[in-house]
């Protein structure tokens, strides 16, 4: 069988949305959300002629270059890097060139370093020596989630790891500040005279809603306002 093109011809017209648009990418039969996001990444970041230009409302190219910030709450950096490479897209190289940034919203989203340090300090305390009979030796309990050593805060290709702290809109505002800082950093990377626009893609924000919910003061209304707020700092936003 002949090799399939990275972008199916019938899908190509939908991969260049107009400026300042908010696009919902959802899974359909035989085309999962991450499959569609990868094609969107390819269309935006591919080195083919004209693929990096922004399309205006009238369909004409504005001459501005596109950069992409990908925030994923469900899939890690290794997944996106390996799957994009199958399409001929080297995300690590694009990140080095200041055209792409990945935000990890999965691995340490609910990780609390303060709890881990407190637990390790308590477990490392030296007990007072007693002159009584030696206690019965018991097996050490298995380390819980709070006792594990923290992962490195950064790794090649990962611009930032998100940490959820607090409740309600205050917690979402904290996440937004971290995301905005990455967007601003990507905008300022490269030639200052070269106009560029940042496309923000949020993968599986419904996982954040499911993992928090009313018990953390976050519902559908708060999530909607949060996504709309992110759109204000990025000229284009897409989310799955």
Image: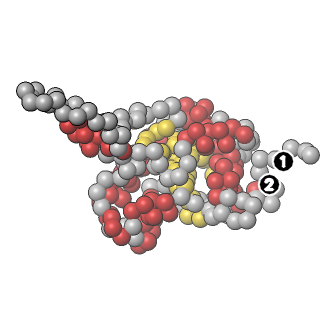
Q: CA distance from mark 1 to mark 2?
A: 8 Å
Residue at 64% x, 58% y is 33
Q: Secondary structure at mark 1?
A: loop
- Residue drawn 73% across the image and 42% down it: 87
- As rendered, which of 92 and 66 lies closer to the eye? 92
Q: Which residue is mark 1?
A: 4
Q: Which mark is residue 60?
A: none
**Name of the residue lying farthest toward the left:** 131
Image quadrant assignment for residue 201: bottom right
Compared with residue 215, is residue 202 higher up or lower down, i.e. above or below?
A: above
Q: Is residue 4 above or below residue 204?
A: above
Pointer 1 and pointer 2: residues touching (CB < 8 Å)?
yes
Direction from residue 32 to residue 152 in the image, left or right = left
Instruction: Identify the image quadrant of the C terminus.
Output: bottom right
Q: Residue at x 9, y 30 (%)?
A: 132
SS for tag 2? Answer: loop
Depth check: give the residue in front, 175 or 17. 175
Quarter of the figure with residue 30: bottom right
* Residue 128 image position (x, y, % from top left): 10, 29
Q: Position of residue 191 (x, y in %)?
A: 52, 34
Please state which of the two labelled residues, at mark 1 or mark 2, is closer to the viewer: 1
| Visible residue check, residue 217 | yes
Question: Which residue corresponds to mark 2?
Answer: 8
10 Å neighbourhood of mark 2: few (<14), some, or many (≥20)? few
Q: Nearer the viewer, residue 169 or 148?
A: 148
């Amino acid at each position: 069988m002949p090799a399939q093109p990275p972008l199916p011809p019938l899908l190509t017209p939908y991969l260049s949305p107009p400026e300042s648009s908010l696009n919902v990418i959802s899974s359909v039969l035989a085309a999962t959300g991450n499959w569609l996001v990868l094609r969107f990444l390819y269309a935006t970041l591919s080195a083919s002629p004209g693929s990096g230009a922004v399309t205006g409302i009238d369909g004409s190219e504005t001459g501005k270059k596109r950069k992409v910030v990908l925030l994923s709450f469900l899939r890690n950096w290794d997944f996106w890097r390996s799957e994009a490479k199958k399409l001929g897209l080297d995300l690590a190289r694009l990140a080095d060139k200041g055209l792409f940034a990945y935000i990890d919203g999965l691995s340490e989203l609910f990780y609390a370093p303060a709890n881990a340090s407190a637990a390790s300090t308590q477990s490392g305390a030296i007990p007072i020596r007693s002159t009584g009979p030696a206690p019965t030796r018991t097996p050490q309990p298995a380390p819980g989630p709070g006792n594990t050593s923290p992962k490195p805060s950064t790794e090649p290709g990962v611009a930032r790891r998100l940490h959820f702290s607090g409740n309600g809109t205050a917690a979402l505002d904290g996440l937004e500040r971290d995301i905005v800082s990455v967007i601003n950093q990507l905008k300022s990377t490269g030639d200052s005279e070269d106009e560029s626009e940042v496309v923000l893609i949020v993968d599986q924000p419904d996982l954040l809603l499911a993992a928090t919910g009313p018990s953390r003061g976050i519902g559908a209304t708060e999530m909607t306002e949060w996504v709309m707020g992110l759109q204000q700092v990025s000229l284009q936003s897409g989310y799955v």
